[in-house]
Amino acid sequence: MMDVKLYLDEVGKRVMERRKKLGLTQEALAEMSDLTTQFVSYAESGKRAMRPENLMKIASALGVSTDYLLTGDIIDKDKLLLSDKLDKLTAAEVRIIESIIDECIRLYHNDTHGIEKQ
């Protein structure tokens, strides 16, 4: 079983990475989550375990599932959240995103050129 401190560190790392990817400060995430900045800081550093309701608030503010924050796994809810974002794009923009995804699949999953999977 995973050490609790390591587990909290991994959850905190995913929160921080997602927050930064969205260009949010800890203060902004705290406000969006109806939590304190200190709570967000402690959660990101692995110093504080989150109660389920707080984890749900942070996941919602970050646009990811609680499963993703807890395990790093992408589940159907994450795909649904992505689908909701695609609904806001024009048909032409969706096709551009589709081509980007196709290129990523080709780059990361094509073993024919001796490239290691990452």
Image (spheres, rainbow, N blue to C red):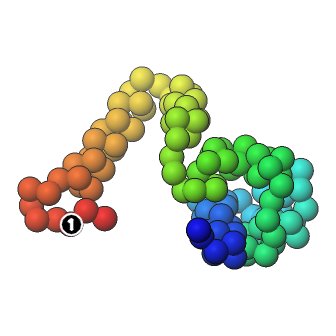
**Disc 1 residue type (three-letter):** Glu
At x 62%, y 48%, the residue is 67
22 vs 67, nearest the viewer:
67
Question: Which residue is label 1 attached to?
Answer: 116
Q: Position of residue 25 (x, y in %)?
A: 75, 64
Q: Position of residue 16 (x, y in %)?
A: 66, 66
Q: Position of residue 50 (x, y in %)?
A: 80, 59
Q: Position of residue 51 (x, y in %)?
A: 83, 55
The answer to whether residue 54 is seen in the rendering is yes
Residue reaching furthest to the front = 1
> Compared with residue 17, is residue 106 higher up or lower down, i.e. above or below?
above
Is 91 on the left or on the right of 82, as rendered? left
At x 27%, y 47%, the residue is 105
Q: Residue 60 falls in which quadrant of the image?
A: top right
Is 105 on the left or on the right of 6, as rendered? left
> Compared with residue 3, is residue 74 higher up or lower down, i.e. above or below?
above
Quadrant in which the C terminus appears: bottom left
At x 51%, y 46%, the residue is 74
